[in-house]
Structure formats: structure tokens, C-alpha cells
Amino acid sequence: MKTRNRGGLIVAGLAVIIAGGAIAAGGSFLAGQSASVPADVFRIPVHGVIERGLAPFIARGLREAGRAGARAAILDIETPGGRVDAAQFIVDAIKDSPVPVYAFVNRRAFSAGALIAIATRDVWMRPGSVMGAATPVTGEGQKAPEKIVSAMRSEMRALAEDRGLDPRIAEAMVDEDVEIEGVVERGKLLTLTTEEAVRVGYAREVADWDALLAALDLEGAAVHEMRVNWAESLVRFLTHPAVAPLLLSIGMLGIIIEFKTPAFGLAGLAGLGALSLFFGGHWLVGLAGLEELMLLGAGLILLGIEAFVLPGFGIAGFAGLLAVGSSIYLSMVSSLSTAADMGLAAGVIALAGVVVVVVGWALIRAIPGSGRFARSGLLLEDATTREEGYSSSVARAELMGATGEAVTDLRPSGTVQIGDDRIDVVAESMFISAGTKVRVLRYDGTSYVVRAVPQTTVRD
């Protein structure tokens, strides 16, 4: 058994090292350590949903543009919006960029996309494009609380003031209570078409990409098209709202199953691998840090103590679950997260919990009756009872009703000393501590069942 445990731990360690190596390799890509590309213009796509996995890619593109000494970096925006904290991360990268950053609204810049566009030096829009509708919403699609709306409104206003634009226009994109005569009436959220954006001074119209380069006096400039590398694609996949619950479910299921088995096996390996990928991906996008990893480790240690050292389920187990749950939640939010982002994180954890319960129940119900498992020899398809003449061992009549002392803790299985014999038994209750007097009640065909003998009090 010790050899098996040691081998399983070695395999698990290798799995974690490999996962960590892959994440570390990805981190070097995300850190932008590739060689600078000689180019005058960097074209950086901001396509699809804006989430935390996209933000490091935008930041890398702006850093590479700076190292290359580019004359401009242009964000090619086509997005329905996304996470506010991810957009704020991108806005900070734009402000820190050593090269001028422009926005090219290539059809749509809704919600977080509008925030990013207004943060650039200048906004250029193709005919028929739209920009605005930036009010934050909850995970259920409802308008966020006033506190969140106020913060977003102030952020948009500050960006507009920094560029010398009418701040009321930016506020009206966030709050439908803002009324601007001739632009938007009260009760309607502002979304600007290309013509409207040009009229209020928020954008300039340009026919296409080539026309944009000409307008910026960059006609004929060498253009470098930024592409998402394999590491960034992996991180975006691992942090996707649909994938994160799956990784959490596999991780928690693997750990739970491993605590219920006597040796380390595939369940524990899968659980550790899934949790490594989950935390690794969130670490690379700046959500999970050393604190979250330490909290996760403390939680797993407490759960291990509860499973292998302490009887029943008590304070250590509760504290372990709380620590693991807290580490997962904190790794999905940041100081820039809105209430909607926090609600989404809580929803992901809740969904993972539901998946664990449903899948665990399905495994308990389905695996024992699976013909494939029965044919493999891992499980017995049929049971043979004592009434049919089968017994795994012969019951010793002299042990029936005999008393002895528990040599080990019975959890509920363990060993007792009866006379000169050491007998493997199962406690009728869940736990009996070592040194307790016990009595043999019966033999169930596989083991002896014992019960603690009540202690008598001697009175003077």
C-alpha cells in the first residue's frame, strides 16, 4: 500500500509540474518576451467578448509596439462588450502605452468596447458602425445597482474630460437618466451611430483601414498584425465562463473521491490537474495570486486532516471547505470587479457544485451496473449471498458476543484485540477510538461487527 501511495504521489507531482511548466511557458509569452517586430503600425484586434483572457493579449501588443518604436498602435474594435474589470485593465494599458493608441470601430463598440475606444487618443468609425450602450448589468442581464452605475459613469466622464470631449455624452452611454437636448432624451440609453458620433465630436468617419492609415499620415507604413499566441488562446480557454465550472467540477470530484479511497490514483491526479489548470489560467490573467494559492493549500491540508486524522466531520473539514471555496472565489474576482463580475464568480462556483452533486450521484448509480466495468473485472456484476452458500471466510462461533479492546481507531473499520487474536472488524457506529472496550455483535459474511461496551461507573 505504501508503494502504491508513493507511486501515485510521484505521478501526481509530475502532473502538477508539467501543468506548471506549461503555465510558466505561457507566462513567458504573456509577458511579451518575444523579439520585437520592426513595424510602423501595430494593428491589435479587440474582437469578441471582452474578458480577462483578452486583456493580457492587448497589453502585450502595446508593449511590443513600444519596444519596436512604432509610430502608432491601432485597436481594431468589434465587440458586444464584456467584463468591466477586463476593460479597465486594457484602459490602464492604453494610458501606459509609450506609443499613440487609436481606436478603429470596425462595426460595433458596445459596453466595455465603448470604454476602451474613448480611452484612446482618437476614435475612427467605419460607416454604419455604432458605439455606446455602456451601462453595467448583472449576471441576469438586469441593470447593476446604482453604486456600480455611478462608478462606471464617473469612469466614462473622466476619460471624456481627459480627451476634451463633452462628458455628458459619455455619461449618457451609461445612465439613461442623463438627458442631452438634440442627442438623447431621458429614459433612453445613448448609442451613437457613425454620423452621430462625428456630429458630437466623439469620432471621425473613415471608409476603411487603408483610408485610416492615410488619415493618420501613415500611408505605406509597415503594418504588423498582432495574433493571439497559443498560450493566450489556452488562457482564454481556461478562463472562459463555460470552461471554469468544468475544471472546478473535475477538481472537486477528484479530491472528494480520492479522500474516500485508500490510495492515490487517477481521481486525485485528475483533480489536482484540473485545479492546477484553473488556478494557473487565472494566475496568468492577474486574478489568482500567491494569497489564493496559499489559501487553497491550507484548505486541502485541513480537508486531509479531517479525512485521515480526525473522526467524523467537524471544524477542520468546515474550515477546509471554506478555505478552498474562498480561494476559488477570490481567484475569479479582482479589486476592479463589479457586482456583476462577483455575481458571475459566485454563479460559476454554484454551478460547479451542482455539477459535482449530479455527476457524483450519477456515478454512484450508473457505474456498479455498467456492463463495461463488470467485464473489465474492476467491479462485480452480481452479488453472491450467504443464503446461496457463499461466505468469504468462515465465522468463528467463539467470537460471537466476545469482548475485546480496539487496537486502532475504528473509522469504522479497524483492528481489535480479543484474547490472543487480532481481528479486523467494522464498528456499528461511524467511529470508536483506540483503547475502547468493544463487543462482537455479529458476522455479516465479510467482517465482524462490533459495538462499544458502555463504561460502568463504580460508586463508593
Image: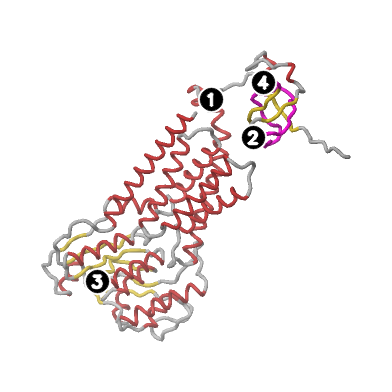
Residue wearing tag 3: 101
Name the spot of residue 442 as percent of width and height, x first: 73, 23
Within 10 Å of disc 2 (Cα), the crowding (few <14, some 14-19, many 20+) is some
Residues at marks 2 and 4, CA–CA distance in whole angstroms? 17 Å
Residue wearing tag 2: 409
Q: Earlier in the sequence, mark 2 or mark 4?
A: 2
Secondary-structure class at tag 4: strand
Secondary-structure class at tag 2: loop
Q: Would you say the residues marked 3 and 4 are in contact, meaning their CB atoms lie under 8 Å apart?
A: no
Within 10 Å of disc 3 (Cα), the crowding (few <14, some 14-19, many 20+) is many
| Residue range of the region highlighted in magenta in the rendering | 419-447
User: Residue 333, relative to residue 161: is it above or below?
Assistant: above
4 or 1: mark nearer the eye: 4
**Left or right of 406 on screen, residue 149:** left
Residue 296: mark in rendering: none
Residue wearing tag 4: 421
Residue wearing tag 1: 379
Q: Which amino acid does the dot numbered 3 rest on? A: Val
Q: How many marks?
A: 4
2 or 4: mark nearer the eye: 4
Q: Is residue 427 magenta?
A: yes
Q: Which one is nearer the viewer's eye here, 445 or 209?
A: 445
